[in-house]
């Protein structure tokens, strides 16, 4: 686990995420901003672009992670810290896990977001297993289902991640 940022740094970076969120509303986007501070101390920014890009996955945190990885030329953001203006949803938490981000800080919580009309409480219930009917997920037996994994193991040039 990486060293914890100072309380002053956390306040500063969360303030920057909030400023991004406010500016994004003025620019016609959703009220969410985020930044990733990579292990080298560089800041990488993201704002919610769902409606402008017609991309339901373009949450501020995901955009900041994509930006950080692209600018770092590295899909592994180990040692990075994610700062978000609002509590990251399950999508963003999963993206941060895949990016190997070490810590996450957020300002407003899910209840503040819900009061503004952004309610992902159902998604948390889905992952808790209490609302499976929201989106049934089913495995189906297919004879070739292991072929991609065999190809991966047999490829000596693969990039592990
Ligand atoms: Zn999200």
Image (cartoon, helix red, strand yellow):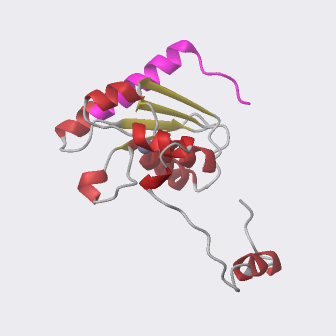
Residue 57 higher or lower than 27, as above or below: below
Q: Could you tell me which residue is drawn at 36 percent across and 36 percent down?
A: 33
Residue 109 percent location from the top left of the image: 41, 25
Between 128 and 11, the one lying in front of the other is 128
Q: In this image, 20 relative to 155: left or right?
A: left
Q: Which residues are magenta?
A: 1-21
Write down which quadrant ligand 1 falls in: top left
Point out the image quarter for the N terminus.
top right
User: Does the magenta portion include 80?
Assistant: no
Q: Quadrant of the C terminus?
A: bottom right
Looking at the image, residue 107 sits to the left or right of residue 40; the answer is: left
Report the residue at 52% width, 42% height from top: 130
Residue 158, quarter of picture: bottom right
Quarter of the image holding residue 152? bottom right
Residue at 24 percent across and 54 percent down: it is: 52
Residue 21: x, y in percent?
30, 34
Spot occupied by residue 24 in the image (x, y as percentages of width and height): 25, 39
Q: Residue furthest top?
A: 7
């Amino acid at each position: 686990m990486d060293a914890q940022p100072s309380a002053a740094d956390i306040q500063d970076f969360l303030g920057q995420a909030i400023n991004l969120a406010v500016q994004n509303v003025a620019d016609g986007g959703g009220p969410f901003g985020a930044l990733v501070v990579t292990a080298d101390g560089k800041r990488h920014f993201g704002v919610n672009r769902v409606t402008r890009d017609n991309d339901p996955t373009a949450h501020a945190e995901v955009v900041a992670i994509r930006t950080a990885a692209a600018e770092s030329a590295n899909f592994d953001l180990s040692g990075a810290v994610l700062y978000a203006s609002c509590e990251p949803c399950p999508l963003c938490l999963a993206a941060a896990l895949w990016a190997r981000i070490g810590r996450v800080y957020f300002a407003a919580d899910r209840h503040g977001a819900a009061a503004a009309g952004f309610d992902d409480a159902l998604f948390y219930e889905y992952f808790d297993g209490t609302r499976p009917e929201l989106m049934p997920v089913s495995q189906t037996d297919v004879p070739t289902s292991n072929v991609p994994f065999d190809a991966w193991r047999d490829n000596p040039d693969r990039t592990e991640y």
